[in-house]
Amino acid sequence: MAPPETPPPRLPYHPVKACMMRFMGRLTKHARKSGHCSPPERGAESVSFLGRLKDRQTRQGSSSKISSSLGEYQEVIKSKMAETKQQLEPLRVALISGITGQDGSYLTEFLLAKGYEVHGIIRRSSNFNTQRLEHLYIDPHNSSARMKLHYGDLTDASSLRKWVDTICPDEVYNLGAQSHVGVSFENPDYTADVVATGALRLLEAVRTHIETTGRKVKYYQAGSSEMYGATPPPQDETTIFHPRSPYAVSKVAAHWYTVNYREAYGLFACNGILFNHESPRRGENFVTRKITRAVGRIKIGLQKKLFLGNLQASRDWGFAGDYVEAMWLMLQQDKPDDYVVATEDSHTVEEFLEAAFGYVGLNWKDYVAIDPRYFRPSEVDNLRGSAAKAREALGWKPKVDFKQLVAMMVESDLERAKREKVLADNGFIDAHQQP
């Protein structure tokens, strides 16, 4: 028996070739799917057709019509070739950390509507944590799927580098974080590792990828108004940072890492200093959602009390769906820069309570109690942004105002409470889990 043939040696992985192969694969796949031939073939076909048209009209003695017919057809050809070129352009690719969060889900919706292919980094969990993306999910075996999820973590540099090299993104959005200010006092080490050093790991993955492949990649870093802390309002891009929590300190570090990589390595890296932005997808342990969740349950009869901390803290609250557009706009500019994104209108927690409870005809004072456990070791009194730079340079402005935001959130949680009431009445859940 002849000995088995020795398999050829496996070539080493090369990021440049891998990206080129991926680019050509996307281009070919898109061209076949759209049913268009390449521009050169279309052009040759057009020239041949024009020649046949001219010969036929000459034989028919209609030379007077040749010029107008050719002119009309040339316009059609130009239009078709421009359309074909646009359809053959490869999809832009975005990589999002924190894709399962509030901002990540809205940004994914926005980018998919823009025609992007969107990849998200998610942490492995025994429980599904992709609820905010369920309406966007298409099985990756389906050729029409343009959103894909990959296991990774901002605490794991190797996974970040692997996915940046594999996906070859055009834009990277770092939204991942331990983003709860109160929790950051209880878990400061973890908060710093994910928020500050996590941003550094992702920046380094992008930098080394660019250095190795020569590709152009743009990077967005999600900043926070909490970085201003004790500095009085209004706060803009030139305002001095005075962070008052481990979360805020970590965000300041991530901000300056981003500036440093932009200045030291020429990275197209932008900081978006976003003031508080809420939505029906906000986590239930954030004060705005905690309030609207309680309003719905109290109105339906599933809850009697709501416990809160500092009611005089004032925040500039906007709609998360508006703010993700500003993120994208930053990366579409000619030069990278840092921008404040805000409504320029602030309200206290008490004012939020009045608006939320008043929307369903209730008086918040009958249901709200103060719990000292919810006060933080160092409070931030007032945050109100000045978004003049974003308005002038990006052409961005918020579409949803404070009252509309509160109404949107209350309506959503009221509908959810009604569904819970049906389950509680039929014994599927305990109606007395909340106070």
Image (cartoon, helix red, strand yellow):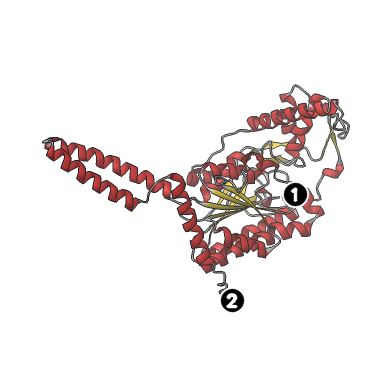
Q: Is residue 345 visible?
A: yes
Q: Nearer the viewer, residue 152 or 236?
A: 152
Residue 276 seen in the current view: no
Q: Position of residue 429 (x, y in %)?
A: 85, 32
- The label on residue 181 is 1
Between disc 1 and disc 2, whose residue precedes?
A: 2
In front of the other: 7 or 72: 7
Q: Nearer the viewer, residue 347 or 194?
A: 194
| Residue depicted at x 75% and y 53% | 245
Q: Quadrant of residue 2?
A: bottom right
Identify which amino acid the numbered label 2 is placed on. Thr
Q: Amino acid at mark 1?
A: Val
Residue lying furthest top in this view?
361
Write the residue at 24% across / 48% down. Answer: 47
Query: Relative to 285, is 174 above or below?
Result: below
| On screen, residue 226 above or below 208 | above
Mark 2 element type: loop
Vertical arrangement, residue 382 with respect to residue 269, above or below = above
User: Would you say 41 lies left or right of 187 here?
Assistant: left
**Image quarter in which the N terminus is found:** bottom right
Secondary-structure class at tag 1: helix
Q: Position of residue 225 (x, y in %)?
A: 66, 48
Residue, disc 2: 6
Residue 383: percent from left, percent from top: 67, 44
